Image: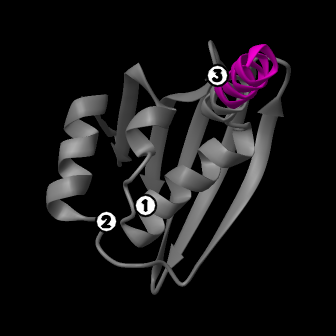
Amino acid sequence: MKTLKLTIAVLAFLFVGVTANAATKKITKTDVVNIYIDAIANGKTQGLDNVLDNDMQFNTKRGENITTIDKNTFLDFLTKNGTGGAPLNTSTTVIQDDENTQKIKVDFKYDGFVRSDVLTLSRTTGWVITNVTSTTK
């Protein structure tokens, strides 16, 4: 009986350890960028909220005008309006990459124009997007 109790206790301990380890899987910079691209290119916004910093700013440049919105406004817009259609293709270019920050340019090529988003990622408790600057050419 004592052996059975000990076996059950060890199994319970292992189960809790494995579950806790799976729940704390770190999201990489690549994961963050792919979640963003999937949201913009395909309208799949699931998980996007988790990779955007609470103080994130989204800036849109149109000529000399710059419009800035916060995380909640950005998410509301994507949820209600979508992204306007899937791009023909998408490419990424790393602009800066160090231990705690990364800047990456994502080009969404549509028929007749290119939307370029420069993402700033920062590592706090995990990797998150802190700023996006979007231009259209």
State the residue at coordinates (34%, 40%): 64
Between 127 and 82, the one lying in front of the other is 127
Q: Nearer the viewer, mark 2 or mark 3?
A: 3
From the top left corner, tell me how far across and down residue 2 is, in percent: 77, 13
Q: What amino acid type should be assigned to the residue bearing mark 1?
A: Ile
Between 118 and 21, the one lying in front of the other is 21
Pointer 1 local density, CA inside 10 Å: few below 14, some 14–19, many at least 20: many
Q: Main secondary structure of the magenta part?
A: helix
User: Disc 2, disc 3: CB below 8 Å?
Assistant: no
State the residue at coordinates (34%, 78%): 85
Between 73 and 16, the one lying in front of the other is 16
The quarter holding residue 95 reads: top right
Pointer 3 local density, CA inside 10 Å: few below 14, some 14–19, many at least 20: some
Instruction: Give the residues in magenta.
Output: 1-16
Taking the image as shown, residue 130 lies to the left or right of residue 17, namely: left
User: Disc 2, disc 1: CB below 8 Å?
Assistant: yes
Q: Which residue corresponds to mark 3?
A: 126
Taking the image as shown, residue 27 lies to the left or right of residue 64, namely: right
Distance of mark 2 from mark 3, alpha carbons? 26 Å
Taking the image as shown, residue 54 lies to the left or right of residue 91, namely: left
Q: Which residue corresponds to mark 2?
A: 83
Distance of mark 3 from mark 1, alpha carbons? 22 Å
